Amino acid sequence: MENKITIAVDGFASCGKSTLAKGIAKALDYAYIDTGAMYRAVTLYCIENEVNINDDNAIQSALDAIDIRFKTIEGKNTAFLNGKNVEEDIRKMFVSNRVSEVAAVSLVRRAMVRQQQEMGKEKGVILDGRDIGTVVFPDAELKLFMTANIEVRTQRRLLELQNKGQSITPEIIAKNLQHRDHIDSTRADSPLKQADDAIVIDNSNLTENEQLTMCLALVKIRINS
C-alpha cells in the first residue's frame, strides 16, 4: 500500500482500541500514537505532585512542567514522563480511577490535542483515544468507533490487571469503567461520541485477529477509494 492515510480509533474504555491500533500500525508500518497514555501520564503527574485539578493556575503550571514522549522498547510502545519510563505506573488502578476527571479539564485537553495534532499531522499514522475522530483529526480518512458490552470489557480489564500482578475484583472494575464512560461522555470539552462518519465495530464476540483482519480490509478500501 503506497498511499497512506490517517486513521482515528475511538471508543469506550477496555474495548480493545489500543490492541487494534497497535496491530494496524504494525501491519502497515504506520506510526502509532497512544493518546490515552498521554492523559494517564498527566494524571500520574498530578497525583504524585498533589496538583489541584480545579485550580487553572496549578494545572497550567503542571502542564508547563510535563514532557511526554514515546519510545519503542523491545517492540513495545512505551510512555516516558519527564524522562522516566512510566508505562507500568500509568496502567495501574490508582491512575485509572482519576484519569477521566483529569482528562475532562479543558486546559489539559487543549494541551494534549495540540500535541497530538502536531505528532500526527503526517499521513501514515493511527491514533486511538476518546475524541480523535471528532476533535483531534476530524478529517481522518478512516474513523473506527469501538464498543463492546460491559461484561466483556470487565473481563478484558481484569485479565490485563491480573497479568500485571494486580489483584482486584470484577465489581470494582465494572464500576470504574461505567464511571469513566459517564465522565468521558458528558464532559463539556470534547466529549466521547461517535463521529457521524465513523464505522462502528462491536467486538464483544470478535477475536483480536478477526477484528484486525476486518479493519485492515477497511483501510485497503479507503486507500483505494
Image (tube, grey):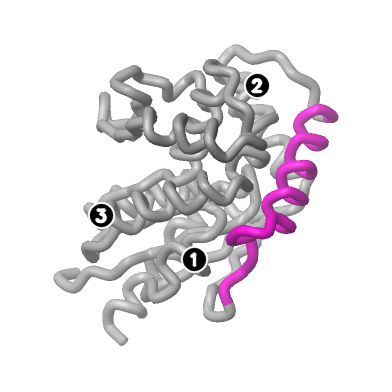
Is residue 76 shown left or right of residue 16? left
Residue receiving disc 2: 94
Residue at the spot 57% in from the left edge and 40% down from the top edge: 56
Callout count: 3
Secondary structure beneath label 1: helix
The boundaries of the magenta stretch are 171-195
Of labels 2 and 1, the one closer to you: 1
Q: Amino acid at mark 2?
A: Phe
Q: Quadrant of residue 67?
A: top left
Label 3 or label 1, whichever comes before in sequence order: 3
Q: Percent x, y for residue 24?
A: 36, 55
Secondary structure beneath label 3: loop
Secondary structure beneath label 2: helix
Q: Label for residue 135?
A: 1
Query: In this view of the protein, which residue sits in the foreground, 218 or 51?
Result: 51
Q: Amino acid at mark 3?
A: Tyr
Q: Label for residue 30?
A: 3
- Label 2 packing within 10 angstroms: few (<14), some (14-19), many (20+): few
